[in-house]
Image: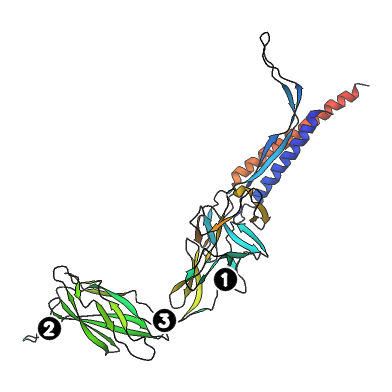
Amino acid sequence: MLRSMYSAIAGLKAHQVKLDVTGNNIANVNTVGFKSSQATFEDTLSQVMRNGSAPTDTAGGTNPAQVGLGVKVAGITTNFAQGTQQTTGRATDFMISGDGFFVTKTGNEQLYTRAGSFDYDASGKIVTPDGAVLQGWMAGPDGVDTNGAIGDLKVPFGQNMPPTATTKGAIVGNLSTSAVVAVTGPPAVPATQLQTQVTSYDSLGTAHQITLKFTKTDVNTWEVQASENGTDIGSAADLTFDPSTGLPDSGADFEIGVSGDNWPGTIALDLSGMTEYGGKSALAPLDIDGNAMGTLQSIALSGDGTIMGVYSNNLREPIGKLAMASFANPSGLAKAGNTSYRVGDNSGQPAIGEANAGGRGSLVAGALEMSNVDLAEEFTGLIVAQRGFQANSRVITSSDEVLQDLVNLKR
């Protein structure tokens, strides 16, 4: 039989594979996290009709005469280029900006995916649409330890944050040098007074509004007094400023001597951040500790993968952190279905760690990475594959006509 017919058959098979790959890409044009593939061809062995020869003193060299025996699929490679971002606004939609994969677990198998469309199951675990559980590190008493083993990420909805009593804080701002000291008169001039409120909590989480009153008593000296509901608590203290710098000279460590069964005893306020400069007076509390009881209401994701719990008392605490994996050769991963991959023989072992480290990208919450399929490129490839298939079928037709003519020679 003619070699051209078998070569054309090989061409039909190869272009059929290219059509299959292109069709799969187009079918997944809107699949979250999908990575397009590309079929590449290479020629097969060639039949030597005449060997070549080296040049001699009396004759020139000759090239070999070879006839190719067709084409074959050299490989189907995956394009891991970044897909476009689609903003969804869902707290459980995560997008990887850069390299890396989410780590999920189905049964006892660990899989990897770029599709970040997650949700909660009945137990609070963060899962993929097909039920695979997102992996990471849960927070412990000392925060999130990313050096430990990864496990299922679970959001404990309904969890309560216990109240803590206020023990310390600070007051910052400026006490104007234009403030006046009280004058008995006549005419009588009252001393300049400034106030600011500090919200503090006892050990049961009950809020207390403590008023701090600053009264100008002398040049560069202010009396500080704490009160609650109009009743003074603790003793007053003097805060003096250095006239050459406007910074506190003494009295910057002020203690509020609170009392009651649910109070810790004292609240230490740092006044060292205050100044006495010309201009307007302004006071503000800063870094006041303590909190009321709170209930976990929602989550928020940071760029490094930390899942922050948002509580009803307006505080945030880390719940866990997403784990990400990177590979020396992502193209060597084996597709496992459901837009997931498993470790392949040529992918290398996963390097699991935090986002924004070790070649792993950052994370974006409320967004998804869409398919990186380029429809214009795929339709062009579809035309090329179709024409290649048609051309090879024409070669088979021509070879058949040659064989028919050969058979007809006997007639």
Q: Nearer the viewer, residue 82 or 52?
A: 52
Q: Position of residue 93 (x, y in %)?
A: 55, 63
Quadrant position of residue 51: top right
- Amino acid on which disc 1 is placed: Lys
- Amino acid on which disc 2 is placed: Ala
- At label 3, counting other C-alpha atoms closer than 10 Å, the crowd grade (few under 14, some 14-19, many 20 or more) is some
- At label 2, counting other C-alpha atoms closer than 10 Å, the crowd grade (few under 14, some 14-19, many 20 or more) is some
Q: Nearer the viewer, residue 77 or 280?
A: 77
Q: Nearer the viewer, mark 1 or mark 2?
A: 1
Q: Is residue 182 left or right of residue 40?
A: left
Q: Position of residue 329 (x, y in %)?
A: 59, 48
Question: Quick one: which residue is furthest to the right in this view?
Answer: 411
SS type, badge 3: loop
Q: On the rendered image, what quadrant is the C terminus found in?
A: top right
> Residue, x 34% and y 74% (percent of image)?
287
Q: Mark 3 or mark 1, which has the lower sequence index?
A: 1
Say which residue label 2 marks. Answer: 182
Q: Position of residue 73 (x, y in %)?
A: 70, 39
Which numbered marker is on residue 154?
Answer: 1
- Amino acid on which disc 3 is placed: Thr
Q: How is the image coloured?
A: rainbow
Q: Is residue 332 left or right of residue 292?
A: right
Q: Mark 1 or mark 2, which has the lower sequence index?
A: 1
Question: Mark 3 to mark 1: distance in Å?
Answer: 25 Å
Which numbered marker is on residue 164?
Answer: 3
Residue 49, relative to residue 310: is it above or below? Answer: above
SS type, badge 2: loop
